């Protein structure tokens, strides 16, 4: 079951690839600095995921103005994520949940991704959005069952606005 509004956000440490090399991002070290938006996406280099993260990258100033830091999380390795970001112009930090532990902790991992296509990839993250306040409490949670459905980003921004 996905985490709900009012739940404490589970801590995690994930890898992101930067120009300086691989870096660790620990959620608990981000808490208190700004509000956070975690965007779980199923897979790098796919059309909907690329569109979503390019749109967010292009509108990142909206999130900056709401005192929010946005992170995208997928089960892809950090080197694939870096290549995806460079090819597509994604500027958000992409965090690698390669073992799918964070997707499971947040309750957003598919048991079987796209079973109608006979894909047997368990653990792939459902497209999801979580807003976490400066105390580490989830203030907005949205989980999509179908990978082509995007979160309601106006609702995400409204949740951030309510924290101002």
Image (cartoon, rainbow, N blue to C red):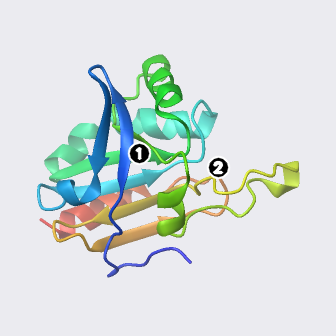
The image quarter in which residue 64 lies: top left
Q: Nearer the viewer, residue 62 or 147?
A: 147
Circle 2 sits in a helix, a strand or a loop, which is it? loop
Instruction: Specify the farthest residue to the bottom.
Output: 6
User: What residue lies at 38% left-to-right and 63% top-to-bottom?
Assistant: 130
Q: Nearer the viewer, residue 7 or 63?
A: 7
Q: Is residue 153 left or right of residue 32?
A: right
User: Any mark on residue 148, and which?
Assistant: 2
Q: Is there CB contact under 8 Å for labels 1 and 2?
A: no
Q: Is residue 52 above or below residue 13?
A: above
Circle 1 residue: 72
Q: Nearer the viewer, residue 23 or 93?
A: 23
Q: Position of residue 50 (x, y in %)?
A: 53, 33
Q: CA distance from mark 1 to mark 2?
A: 16 Å
Q: Position of residue 102 (x, y in %)?
A: 47, 59
First along the sequence among labels 1 and 2: 1
User: Any mark on residue 107, and which?
Assistant: none
């Amino acid at each position: 079951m996905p985490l709900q509004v009012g739940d404490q956000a589970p801590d995690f440490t994930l890898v992101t690839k930067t120009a300086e090399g691989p870096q660790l991002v620990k959620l608990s070290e981000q808490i208190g600095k700004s509000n956070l938006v975690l965007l779980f996406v199923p897979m790098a280099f796919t059309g909907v995921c690329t569109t979503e993260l390019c749109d967010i990258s292009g509108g990142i100033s909206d999130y900056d103005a709401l005192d929010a830091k946005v992170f995208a999380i997928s089960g892809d390795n950090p080197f694939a994520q870096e290549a995806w970001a460079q090819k597509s112009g994604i500027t958000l930090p992409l965090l690698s949940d390669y073992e799918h532990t964070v997707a499971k902790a947040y309750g957003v991992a598919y048991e079987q991704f796209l079973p109608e296509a006979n894909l047997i990839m368990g653990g792939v993250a459902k497209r999801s959005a979580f807003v976490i306040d400066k105390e580490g409490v989830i203030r907005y949670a949205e989980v999509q069952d179908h990978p082509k459905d995007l979160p309601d980003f106006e609702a995400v921004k409204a949740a951030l606005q309510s924290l101002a």
